[in-house]
Amino acid sequence: MNARFGMKQKVVLGLTALIAIAAGTAPASALIGADLGSSHHWGVITRNTIGSPVAALRDGPYGSFGVTGTAARPPYGRGSLGIEVADRSTSLTPSSEKVSFGNEVDFYGRPILGTQGLNQVGFHVFQTGENISYGGPTNMPNITFEINPNLTATATTYSSMVWLPPASPVTNAWSGYLDATTTGTWFLTGSAGTATGCNQATPCPFPQLKTALDDGGAQPTIHTAAVGKGRDNMWIGAVDGLRINRTTYDFEATGVKTRRAG
């Protein structure tokens, strides 16, 4: 009786999904990645935030007007992480804002190198033409890992490992997945950047960065993971579907959901 009911339930759910797909209304979350539950350790990292920027879980954005299909809605569920930073709004030098929305708990101590290390990273972005006018095509949010670089050439136990994405392939719409391991460049802050040559002036592709961190000493480890923006140009947009290895973080107005990455 239970087995038969379970089979009927699966059939009904499958038909419902097919009807929704045919109608063009099914969210991408219905199609990609099993729901693994919620992650409760995400929020604004206050010590890494400057000024009065916005990093808020929200519904949408949908559009822009005239945009249809999958590019017109968040790639997972119905929400995203909305980000707003200003370029001239503080009394500091530079005067621009900075925001960091991340997780200071779940990634602590994880390795960066090796098969169990950081091997898949990226996100989807809602970029606008206005943002390009503020700072050019690569005026984009970033992914930042605070790490212990554990380099033999320097005694520092702290550096930020930052991904600078390439230009979004679309504007005023949701992009496809931007893979941080194969596109854009990375840099390390502080003495770790100087020691590896992967600094903000000369950022490196991801494989080169990992090679530079693998110097034969103690292995580098992660402190935190975050999506952020600043301190440079004004930017108003959204991010969704942050992938870190086999988990995709689905930003929803009700919280951050975890999904198994495809």
Image (cartoon, grey):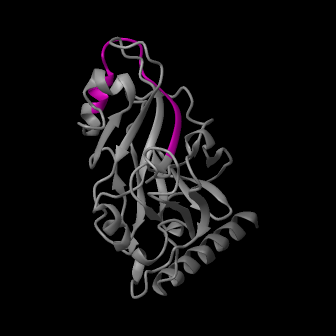
Q: In the figure, 197 relative to 39: above or below?
A: above
Residue at figure coordinates x 61%, y 67% from the top left: 58
Is residue 221 covered in magenta?
yes
Which of the pair 201/115 is nearer the observer?
Answer: 201
Is residue 157 covered in magenta?
no
Which of the pair 212/18 is nearer the observer?
Answer: 212
Indicate the quadrant containing the N terminus: top left, top right, bottom left or bottom right: bottom right
Q: Residue 214's image quarter?
A: top left
Chain part drawn in magenta: 209-226
Q: In the figure, 228 relative to 135: above or below?
A: above
Which of the pair 142/257 is nearer the observer?
Answer: 142
Residue at figure coordinates x 56%, y 56% from the top left: 53
Q: In the figure, 103 relative to 84: above or below?
A: above
Q: Is residue 60 left or right of residue 123?
A: right
Q: Residue 255's image quarter?
A: bottom right
Residue, far front: 91
Q: Position of residue 133 (x, y in %)?
A: 31, 69
Q: Position of residue 66 (x, y in %)?
A: 39, 88
Indicate the quadrant containing the C terminus: top left, top right, bottom left or bottom right: bottom left
Q: Position of residue 190 (x, y in %)?
A: 38, 27
Q: Position of residue 23 (x, y in %)?
A: 49, 87
Residue at figure coordinates x 31%, y 29% from the top left: 210
| Number of numbered discs visible in the structure rendering | 0
Residue at figure coordinates x 51%, y 74% from the top left: 61
Q: Is residue 36 left or right of residue 111?
A: right
Q: Is residue 262 left or right of residue 20?
A: left
Q: Is residue 47 left or right of residue 238?
A: right
Q: Residue 172's image quarter?
A: bottom left
